[in-house]
Amino acid sequence: MTYKRSILVSGFDASIRMRNRQLLICNGKEQRGSVPLDEVDILVIDTPLTTLTNAAVVELAAEGGVIALCDSKHIPGALVLPIEGHCLHAQRLRLQMEVSTPTKKRIWQQLIQAKVINQADALRGLQKEKPATKLVALSKTILSGDTTNVEAQAAQLYWREWLSEEMPDFNRDPDGEPPNLLLNYGYAILRAAVARAIVAVGLHPAVGLFHHNKTNAFALADDVMEPFRPFVDTTVHELYTKHNISTLDQKAKATLINVLHIACQCDGHRSSILNAINHLCDSIILMMMGRTNKLSVPSKSTDETIISTEEENE
C-alpha cells in the first residue's frame, strides 16, 4: 500500500511544480520539499501568493490527490478534485442518482448513530461518563432517516458538556468565539479528505443523502463526514485546553491536518482516519447496490497515536 501524506504549505509564498513524478515545493530558488505525486492525498495551500503549475495540478488530480485552497481566514475555501475518479464513474453516478429513499434513510441512520456514539466516546475521554451514557442511549433511539431528529438532541447535550469546565457558555457557532475557528479548520480538512474518497469510488460529492442545499457542491461529503467530526473535536479540545492554542497558528494547522492519520477502529481493525474514510465510502457503495445492510463506520481506538508510515504500509 502506498503511504498517503497530507501536505501543508504555509508561512511562505511557494512555487509548486512537477518534475519526474515528484511534487516540488520551493521558496524562491530554495527547494523546501519533494514528494512523490502518488503519495499526496491532500495538498493544503494556506498562503496567498503561492503558484502552482498546470502540470502539477492536473497530474496530482490524476493520482487522486486533492488540493485545498485556503481563504483569508485560513479555512479551505476551494477544492480541486479529479473529474473522473473511478473506472466505473458513469455507472456509479447512475447508481447514486437512482438509489431508493429507504436505502438513503438507512445509510443516514447508521451515519448518525456512529456520530453520536463517537461523541459519547469523546466525552468519555474527558471523564464525563454520565452525559456519555446518555448519548449512547440516544443513539439507540435513532430511526431510519433520523425522522425524530435525535442528532440535534445529541448535539445540544454534547456541546453543552464538551467545554463546560473551561467555558461554560461555549456555543458551537462557525462565526463564534474560539475555539470555533479551530473546529472550522479541522472540519474543512476532513471535508476535503471525504470529498476525495467519494470521487475515488465513483460517486459525486454534490448528490447528498440528507444534505441537499442546491448551492452545496459537497452535500454528500457533509453527510459522510459526520461520524468523523468527534475526532476533530477531541484534537481541538486538547489544543485549546492543554496547549492554550485558540488561533490558527502553524502548530494548530499541522496538528489538525494530522487528524487524518490518527488511529481509530474500523471493521474491528486498527486503521487511520484516512483509511477509515475510504472503507466507509466503499461500504456506502455496497449498501446502494444492496450487497450489505451495514456501513463500515469508525470508532475510537484504544491507541490514538499517529499512524506511522510503516503501519500504513502493512
Image (cartoon, rainbow, N blue to C red):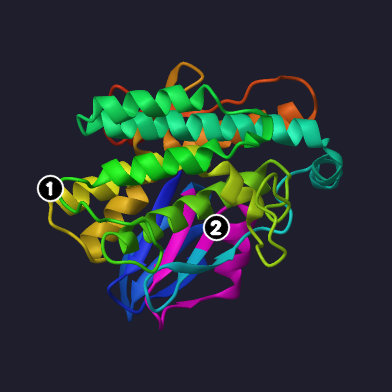
Q: From the viewer's perspective, is the residue at label 2 or at label 1 nearer?
A: 1
What's the amino acid at mark 2?
Answer: Val
Q: Is residue 44 magenta?
A: yes
Residue 166 in the magenta stretch? The answer is no
Question: Is 204 placed left or right of 111 in the picture?
Answer: right
Residue 96 versus residue 165: which sits nearer the camera?
Answer: 165
Observer-nearest of 215 and 93 = 215
Out of 208 and 171, give the one closest to the viewer.
171
x 32%, y 69%: residue:
10
Write down the quadrant of residue 103 in the picture.
Answer: top right
Q: Secondary structure at mark 2?
A: strand
What percent of the width, then of the height, locates residue 113? 53, 29
Q: Is residue 265 visible?
A: no
Nearest to the observer: residue 142 or residue 124: 142
Disc number at residue 66?
Answer: 2
Q: Quadrant of residue 300?
A: top left
For mark 1, what is the residue? Answer: 242
Q: Position of residue 141 (x, y in %)?
A: 55, 24
- The span picked out in magenta is 40-67
Question: Taking 123 as reference, is 18 left or right?
Answer: right
Q: CA distance from mark 2 to mark 1?
A: 31 Å
Q: Amino acid at mark 1?
A: Lys
Instruction: Determine the image quadrant of residue 198.
Output: top right
Lower position in the chain sequence, tag 2 or tag 1: 2
Residues at marks 2 and 1 touching, judged by CB atoms closer than 8 Å: no
Compared across the picture, whether 133 is left or right of 53 comes to left
Q: Is residue 113 visible?
A: yes
Q: Residue at x 52, y 55 (%)?
A: 192
Packing grade of label 1 (10 A; few <14, some 14-19, many >=20) is: few
Residue 216 % position (x, y): 65, 63
- For the point 73% across and 36% down, which residue is it? 104
